Image (cartoon, grey):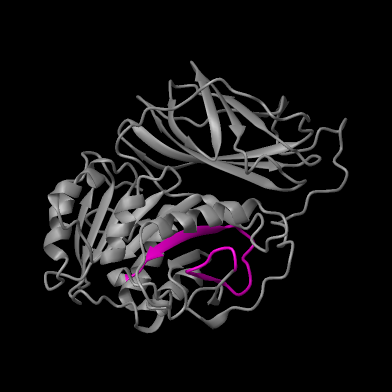
Amino acid sequence: MVAGAVGLAMAATVGMLTTTAAQAAPGCGVDYAVASSWPGGFNATVTITNLGDRLTGWNLTWSFTAGQTVTQLWNGSVNQSGAQVSVTNASYNGNIATGGTASFGFNGTWNGSNPKPGSFTLNGTVCTGTVDPTSQPSSPPPTSTPPPTSTPPPVTSVGGSGPYPAGYETVSNLGNHTIYRPASFPSRPLPVFVWGNGACSANGTSALPFLREIASHGFLAISSGSPNGSGSTTAALLTQSINWAVAENSRQGSWYYGRIDTTKIAVAGFSCGGLEAYEVSNDSRVSTTMIFSSGLLDDANDYQLRRLTKPIAYIIGGSGDIAYPNAIDDWGKLPSGLPAFMGNLPVGHGGTYSQTNGGEFGRVAVLYLKWRLLGDRTAGQTFVGSSCGLCSGTQWTVQQKNLTL
């Protein structure tokens, strides 16, 4: 499940719908999951499973039963008329192989109650999770996510404490980046974590133990900068990371084809990299933002705080962290209703990125990503409520805003 929520309703940009789907769907299943909910708003993800022949375009429709409204949608185009909602594929996710999936996410509003829709229709066929006997697919759907279409190359420096030992690689179509991934792919798609380095350094391995630890728990972590690279980065490299992940997930022939969950993306950074993360946090594809030992340096940039709509987490090195005053200032200026977490650990500005498995920052980052990007409520208990896992019996000092499981 995805995690991510907004604190402000955003106006939906909807238009006339052009349906590209030419085929009926003889069988389909739909997984509709509300990842986060707060007074008046919610965030949901929808995953379509095609149980019939390959589709070259799709249109999914449903009816809300309690007056809910879609305010923003990504990985598709939406049209809503009253309770009736219709979503058509984006240009890059219209093809769904037999047994394949396509996903999109959206933010919405509700009033009083927020029940899930009772049924979904894909290209005119009601999705029941079974195949229409009058139109059997040419081959039975696989029981798990299909393997990559080509063999992944080995990764460098394998390690991490998670169930999927991970390392890093570089690829020709994403220059000046370092990609951390499991050496062997898990059966589920990989949520995405894009990272800006401290000092805006172009050394993509400067936080190797930390990023490898995240990847070892089944995430795709992409760092700005090449391994042991030199020079400086910009926020544009974080956007390039997101663009690449979305493109590779739909590019046949890629070993990432169908293996990346592009509805679950976190943008993050340390120090100067945190400022880069702020810059791209309003990208509609971003599910959550993580700011590590960073804060805006100039009140003229406070507009970046006002435009935040997705959950945010601050991981700071305590009062001895040079970024502490700026982070606290940002915390006080966050939009009303925005789900936010701040944890301070007295380790100073340098954090724990170079420690084994990223140290305590690595452990807490993994738990936050499991909560926000995988919908792991147990992991979420680390951050939510007066008895949260970091709230007592630890060296952490915790602040919370608008957090619910």
Q: Which residue is found at the position 59% from the left and 23% from the top?
A: 17
Q: From where the camera sits, is residue 379 visible?
A: no
Q: Name the residue nearer the viewer: 113 or 68.
A: 68
Task: Tell me which segment is drawn in magenta.
Answer: 172-197
The image shows residue 136, relative to residue 388, as above or below, that is above
Q: Quadrant of residue 43?
A: top left
Q: Residue furthest front?
A: 231
Q: Quadrant of residue 393?
A: bottom left
Q: Residue furthest top?
A: 82
Q: Name the residue nearer the viewer: 156 or 264.
A: 156
Q: Which residue is found at the position 46% from the left and 46% from the top?
A: 285
Residue 312 appears at what percent x and percent y?
A: 30, 52
Residue 81 appears at what percent x and percent y?
A: 51, 16
Q: Is residue 188 magenta?
A: yes
Q: Which residue is found at the position 41% from the left and 48% from the top?
A: 287
Q: Quadrant of residue 129?
A: top right
Q: Name the residue nearer the viewer: 275 or 43.
A: 275
Residue 149 appears at what percent x and percent y?
A: 74, 61
The reply, left or right, for residue 315 in relation to residue 115 is left
Q: From where the camera sits, is residue 367 visible?
A: yes
Q: Is residue 62 magenta?
A: no
Residue 131 appears at what percent x and percent y?
A: 79, 37
Q: Which residue is found at the position 67% from the left and 71% from the top?
A: 152
Q: How many marks?
A: 0
The reply, left or right, for residue 60 in relation to residue 375 is right
The image shows residue 397, relative to residue 301, as above or below, that is below
